[in-house]
Amino acid sequence: MIPPPRVLAYGVGVDSTALLVELVARGETPDLVLTADTAVEKPETYAYLDVIGPWMRARGIHHEIVSYQPKRFKHWPPYYGLLEMCLTNATLPSKSLGGSSCSLKYKKAPQDAFLRSWPPAIAAWERGQRVVRLIGYDAGPRDTLRANHALSIDDPLYDCEYPLRDWRWDRDACTTRIEAEGLPVPPKSACWLCIANRPAEIRALPACCLRLIVLVEARAAPRLHTVEGLWRRSTKARPGSMTLFIRHERLLPADEIDRIVRDAPTELIRFQDVAATIPLGERPTMRDWLDRFEAGLPAVALAA
């Protein structure tokens, strides 16, 4: 019997990197390593791909990077990724609004879509097998809760395995294993828009990410009635609005924050109105607008 293919869900974080390294060392290299790009990962995460990518290629590991591809657009112009969705629809990530995690839409769904057309997966399903998904949940208390929840879900197409938990590896053990391989330890894998970011993590972001945080909250502000911003509600440690935190901490100049809040949402709305009148094949994308915003150019002129 041909064994089912084994696919590592690689989040470019500490746990999944340690899992990858150890699987290869044990002669259990996955048939595929799959990374879902939300387009708002921290810059350090993208930089780590330049480290781990050559390491995988040198070992003949098949690595694919996938992303969410929307088929229906609530508003125009076309958008791709979590940031562009928030700006186009004047909203915040689901978790900031009290909804569920964004992971299902922006991480699991694009991986599922890729595997539906991956020949080894199709062949396994035709044989009546389930594709084995290798998940990097460690043996620490936080990941124990996540693993227990995942184990309660039966998917007819996939069997999930958690080798780090079988090995009883916690986060420290994962860090030690990566260092022993001679690789740098990757940063915490998380979107810079995520509600889970702590104040210290926002302080560490580059100015380009801070400007976009201000933009996202300013664009969504007219529709926010029950939450203050990306952090949802204030605590003793920080405000509910990341913009307010950025202002209080002086992470960006006050006049720059004021300009973004005052001008950018209006410019974006005008751009969307004009873009909606342009034939679909010629219509500029939200990425086009963002490129001009990030360059400090008059983005509203793009679709004029």
Image: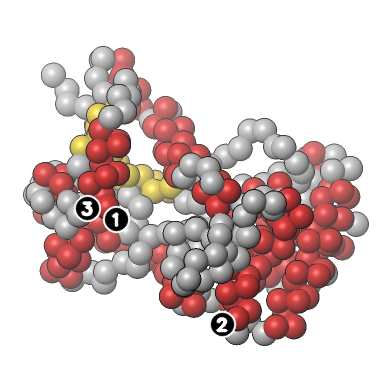
Q: CA distance from mark 2 to mark 1?
A: 42 Å
| Amino acid type at mark 1 | Arg
User: Could one spot residue 83 in this view of the protein?
Assistant: yes
| Amino acid type at mark 2 | Glu
Reply above or below: 178 against 72. below
Tell me what residue is drawn at x 60 percent, y 84 percent.
250
Tell me what residue is drawn at x 45 percent, y 39 percent.
104
What is the quadrant of residue 299 in the picture? bottom right
Q: CA distance from mark 3 to mark 2?
A: 32 Å
User: Could one spot residue 178 in this view of the protein?
Assistant: no
Which residue carries the number 2 mark?
A: 249
Question: Regarding mark 2 in the picture, which secondary structure is present there?
Answer: loop
Mark 3 or 1, nearer chain start: 1
In front: 290, or 65? Answer: 290
Q: Nearer the viewer, mark 3 or mark 1?
A: 3
Estimate the x, y position of residue 150 in percent, counting from the top left.
Answer: 30, 36
The quadrant in which the N terminus is found is top left
Q: Is residue 149 left or right of residue 271?
A: left
